């Protein structure tokens, strides 16, 4: 999926796990499938997983990143109203794998898709409770990390322009350009609050119509509060999305900014992962369709 991708097979994973953590050498090690793009994941027995970053980094950079991720996951797990993975151990480069890696707890549940709970008001209320809880976690003087989604919309002009060029063979680019011109002109967000920062369907677990787990909170930190509203566009159709908005009492501008962040993410998914990760590309398609065919994002 990435030009600098590092592959990890089950043999390498087993060697790393059993030599560095021999207390788990008797446990079965099995690959975990899914639409993830950042880590290759293996299950260790019934209660643990090992996560190996896919994109190559120097050991120093990788070590700093994995420690930042572990700290964010630990803080998130303590405040999340449903189950979330908890870091257990940090592994080091060996057996041909060049970067640090992470062991964390396994969270059971069914991974959602862009359409699996699209009409669920119950899930919408659960998402509202999650976002409300995260927003009330103390920021402790921290600031937005200054890269990626969650800062200034206009900072993504070059990325969006590039993506629109890439998707032109797939869809009419003009409505996308018009939508982005509207989004990028939205007023600034209110003060940054704590956000999960990547509430996509593949990071949300359900048991029936109840949210039961949240994954991949390694970017838990301060950002535009509207950033977590992307889940409404990635996961819900209009009626359930209206429930989410009402439960959070989102202002028109905040709601529109949430749609804008979903757009920034989706416009890249539809082409970047077209051949390598169809599930992720399909998420981009579904989200763009919702954004282009609904009228609940106009703050006027």
Image: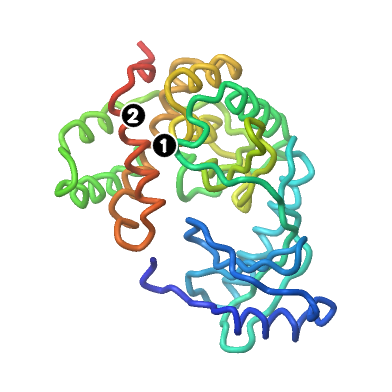
Q: Disc 2, disc 1: CB below 8 Å?
A: yes
Badge number at residue 291: 2
- Point 14% across, 49% down: residue: 169
What x and y, as percent, mark residue 45?
75, 68
What x and y, as percent, mark residue 252?
45, 15
Structural distance between the alpha carbons of marks 2 and 1 = 9 Å
Is 130 rendered above or below residue 95? above
- Point 70% across, 52% down: residue: 73
What x and y, as percent, mark residue 7?
49, 77
Secondary element at image label 2: helix
What x and y, as percent, mark residue 94?
64, 86
Is 79 rendered above or below residue 20? above
> With 240 as the anchor, is 181 left or right in this view?
left
Q: Quadrant of the N terminus?
A: bottom left
Mark 2 vs 1, N-terminal side: 1
Secondary element at image label 1: helix
> With 27 as the anchor, is 5 left or right in this view?
left
Badge number at residue 262: 1
Snapshot quadrant of residue 194:
top right
Q: Quadrant of the C terminus?
A: top left
Snapshot quadrant of residue 44:
bottom right
């Amino acid at each position: 999926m990435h030009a600098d991708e590092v592959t990890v097979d089950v043999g390498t994973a087993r060697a790393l796990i059993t030599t560095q953590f021999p207390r788990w050498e008797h446990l079965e090690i099995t690959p975990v499938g899914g639409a993830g793009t950042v880590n290759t994941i293996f299950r260790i027995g019934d209660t643990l997983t090992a996560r190996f970053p896919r994109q190559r980094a120097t050991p120093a950079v990788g070590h700093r990143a994995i420690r930042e991720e572990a700290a964010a996951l630990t803080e998130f797990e303590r405040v999340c109203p449903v189950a979330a993975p908890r870091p257990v151990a940090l592994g080091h480069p060996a057996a041909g794998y060049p970067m640090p890696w992470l062991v964390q707890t396994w969270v059971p549940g069914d991974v959602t898709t862009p359409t699996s709970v699209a009409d669920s008001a119950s899930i919408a209320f659960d998402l509202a409770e999650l976002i409300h809880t995260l927003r009330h976690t103390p920021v402790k003087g921290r600031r937005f990390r200054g890269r990626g989604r969650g800062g200034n919309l206009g900072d993504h002009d070059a990325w969006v322009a590039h993506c629109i060029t890439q998707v032109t063979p797939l869809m009419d680019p003009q409505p996308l350009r018009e939508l982005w011109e509207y989004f990028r002109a939205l007023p600034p967000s209110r003060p940054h609050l704590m956000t999960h920062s990547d509430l996509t369907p593949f990071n949300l677990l359900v048991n029936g119509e109840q949210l039961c787990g949240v994954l991949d909170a390694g970017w838990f930190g301060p950002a535009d509060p509207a950033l977590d509203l992307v889940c409404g566009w990635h996961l819900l159709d209009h009626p359930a999305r209206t429930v989410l908005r009402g439960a959070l009492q989102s202002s028109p501008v905040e709601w529109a900014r949430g749609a804008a962040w979903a757009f920034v993410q989706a416009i890249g998914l539809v082409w970047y992962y077209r051949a390598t990760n169809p599930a992720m590309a399909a998420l981009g398609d579904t989200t763009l369709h919702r954004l282009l065919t609904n009228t609940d994002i106009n703050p006027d």
